[in-house]
Image (cartoon, rainbow, N blue to C red):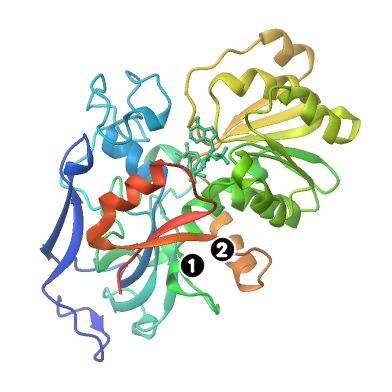
Amino acid sequence: MPESSETDATVTIPARMRAVRLTGHGGFDKLEYRKDVVTPRPAVDEVLIAVGACGMNNTDINTRTAWYSKSVTQGTDAGGSAGFGEAKTDDSTWGGGGVAFPRIQGADVAGTIVAVGAQVPASRVGERVLVDPWMRDAQDPGNRALAGYLGSERDGGFAEFAAVPSVNTFPIQSPHSDAELATFPCSYSTGEYMLTRAQLSAGETVLITGASGGVGSGLVQLAKRRGARVVAVAGKSKMEAVAALGADWVIARDDANFESAVRAAAPDGEVQVVADLVGGAGFASLVELLARGGRYVTSGAIAGPVVDLDLRSLYLKDLTLLGATVMPVGIFESLVGYIEREEIRPLLAKTFPLDRIADAQNAFLRKQHVGNFVITLR
Ligand SMILES: NC(=O)c1ccc[n+]([C@@H]2O[C@H](COP(=O)([O-])OP(=O)(O)OC[C@H]3O[C@@H](n4cnc5c(N)ncnc54)[C@H](OP(=O)(O)O)[C@@H]3O)[C@@H](O)[C@H]2O)c1
């Protein structure tokens, strides 16, 4: 540790640590488990976290496979195991740049502060924290062009220790385990941002696709928390679990009469907001289901990024299309409050130890789960 940093005398911080490094774009063989990675040191305005658990997300896989590259036009799962041969490497991250390998991935960090940089109060050592994965410019935090993501533009939580800016770490009081807390950061903050962006309010009806997944199961709860009515879309085997989260109606995603099934469920046969994570061939129906003045918001395109849009529906119904990725300051802090007040709950589908990360991604890609997968570190 640098002389200027404060450490927890009760925790031994080793010089080297266990971590999984992504060594390039491609298949599971690009995930390298090591026991000799140099433990990071917190910079002056950073803290060092002993990672208790780190949630998994599609973005880990999408970055590994380079699905974000515009040269890829298929759904994310198609290359999940082996990568996409057609992908270019210079636009392979969410932000349109390339990855600096080797990279420690992992956006969803829950753990304890064990050391702080010189400008961070020593009293923070020992705090249990949840990390906001959006790394913002210190001077211009609202500037989306300067934002980076934990595990993409800087090393993340698939490691025993992670150094992150102090401003990104939120103290949390909760009876949940670190593994349960690690289900929240990426998924639920994305869900809350989507609903904020679409200005979903009490009494409105929202249609949520991919409602069984990490973001979708958060969206259902966050929409109910706002007093909205929820029409959720899920695979047949997961419909019951999604209803148990509070969805008012659950429609099977492969329902042959999908559009009429939603119309039959939703009051007045239409919805004010669509929160979509799936895209692909189903996109056109989602737009048709929107009421006049309705808002469509997307954060993902798991079934395919290239969709058909009838512009007549867009302009004749005064619709608004919204994207949601780099969220403003404040969303994450609100989320921590919802967790502490137990207004939302975690859905921990499965945990895996760090050295089984490839098995974890393999299982995650099968999409049999409800909720989130988490890697446990301790
Ligand atoms: N922009 C952002 O900042 C951000 C943040 C987080 C996530 N995302 C994106 O949002 C999407 C959802 O993330 P997540 O973590 O909620 O995913 P997840 O846990 O993998 O769940 C996605 C669910 O979508 C459903 N689905 C519908 N059509 C599918 C298809 N063709 N292939 C596979 N699954 C399909 C599946 O549930 P059923 O079987 O029940 O239908 C699946 O379990 C991903 O594309 C992810 O990359 C974006």
Instruction: Write down the residue under mark 1.
Output: 181
Outermost residue on the front side: it is 237
Q: What kind of residue is marked 1?
A: Leu
- In the structure shown, which secondary structural element does the residue marked by tag 2 occupy? loop
Above or below 364: residue 225? below
Q: Nearer the viewer, residue 358 or 147?
A: 358
Q: Quadrant of the N terminus?
A: bottom left
| Residue at the image position 13 percent from the left and 60 percent from the top | 34
Above or below 58: residue 87? above
Instruction: Write down the residue under mark 2.
Output: 346
Q: Are marks 1 and 2 in contact (CB under 8 Å)?
A: yes
Residue 328 visible in the current orientation: no
Left or right relative to 109: residue 152: left
Above or below 82: residue 114? below
Outermost residue on the right side: it is 268
Q: State the image coordinates of residue 7 (x, y, percent, origin top left).
A: 25, 83
Q: Residue 201: give its label.
A: none
Q: Nearer the viewer, residue 303 or 299?
A: 303
Q: State the image coordinates of residue 230 (x, y, percent, origin top left).
A: 76, 44
Residue 373 quadrant: bottom left
| Residue at the image position 71 percent from the left and 50 percent from the top | 223
